[in-house]
Amino acid sequence: MTNILHSKELIDANELMQFVHMINGVDNLKGIKLQLWSVKFIFIHPKKVNIEGINTLPFVKSVVIGEDYIEIACRRDKQENYLFNYFVNGYKVNKVKGTFDQLFRAFLIIVIISVAVPLVGYILLNMLLSNINN
């Protein structure tokens, strides 16, 4: 068997091609997201994906099935990164914004609000007190 880039941590080229066939081709991918311990594939036509076949691939440790996605955990270190990069760089598949981005934005909004509300209150209070003194 030939491994792409000849690394034992990467995924066999034949297995990758089987995976592409089982997901009904790269054109069926709407997006891909690298999770902490897995890779999430979002599909245009999820019913055309061969879930049972994907479970049998040697690099697949486990599969989580959603309504329009599957999430794959791989058996060895760095395989998730390689799988993600293979589709994003090799096929120009869209990256879906991760949970970290969403949490970071929510955190920034909370910080801005928590700073802005007291500041506006302080300004209004000073305006009120200056009007009373005049």
Image: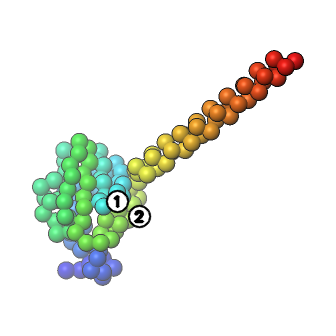
Q: Residues within 10 Å of mark 1 (few under 14, many from 20)?
A: few
- List the residue tagged with mark 2: 89
Q: Residue furthest bottom?
A: 6
Name which of mark 1 and mark 2 comes first in the sequence. 1
Quarter of the image for the N terminus: give it: bottom left
Residue 76: which quarter of the image? bottom left
Residue 74 sits above or below residue 98 on the image:
below
Identify the residue at image location x=24%, y=58%.
72
Q: Separation of disc 1 and disc 2 at Cα?
A: 19 Å
Identify the residue at image location x=33%, y=71%.
78
- Element type at marker 1? loop
Residue 47: which quarter of the image? top left
Please name the amino acid that badge 2 sits on: Asn
Q: Residue furthest front?
A: 133
Identify the residue at image location x=30%, y=69%.
79
Task: Give the camera-side residue of 31 and 109.
Answer: 109
Identify the residue at image location x=20%, y=64%.
60
Q: How is the image coloured?
A: rainbow
The answer to whether residue 103 is visible is: yes
From the top left corner, tell me how far across and down residue 4 is, in percent: 30, 76
Task: Give the camera-side residue of 131 and 120.
Answer: 131
From the top left corner, tell me how far across and down residue 32 is, in percent: 35, 54
- List the residue tagged with mark 1: 36
